[in-house]
Amino acid sequence: MSTMSIAEATAKCTLVGFCPELDWKPLSFVKPIPPNKVCSACGLVRKKTALLPCVHVLCDSCYEQCAQDGVHVCPLDGYQWNDEDDVDWKDFPLIQLLRREVGR
């Protein structure tokens, strides 16, 4: 059984929501995508991520799915919160993504 480092895991990513030419195509990057841009639940890289109070990162799609009756629950550890101010949202602009070199 082999283990991958975070750098190896984030060097190859599937992008969603940036542009039709890049969406849903696994790409390998020379310099890995930062872990705070990769969803901890689905592993996708989207334009917007949420840093949760439990320090997991969710994309906007996974975040929407973790809400129940006004309470959010982290799908990874079960941590619950109800104050939206406890979540730190980050954007990943297309221009930043396009500055990254794609490997072979």
Image: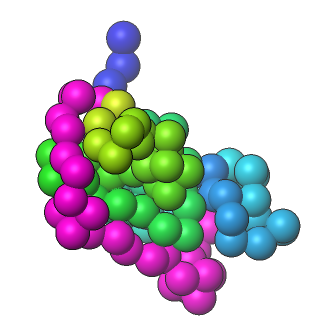
Image position of 74 with respect to 26: above or below: above
In this picture, residue 24 sits left or right of residue 55? right
Task: Where is residue 98? Give x, y as percent.
Answer: 62, 81
Image position of 57 with respect to 1: above or below: below
Toward the bottom, the furthest residue is 95
In this picture, residue 48 sits left or right of residue 67? right
Residue range highlighted in magenta: 76-104
Q: Quadrant of residue 76?
A: top left
Q: Is residue 81 visible?
A: yes
Whether residue 96 appears in magenta in the rendering, the answer is yes
Whether residue 93 appears in magenta in the rendering, the answer is yes
Task: Where is residue 41? Give x, y as percent.
Answer: 42, 37
The residue at 23%/51% (across/down) is 82
The residue at 48%/76% (across/down) is 92
Toward the top, the furthest residue is 1
The residue at 37%/73% (across/down) is 90
How are the colours assigned in the image? rainbow
Position of the C terminus, as image quadrant, is bottom right
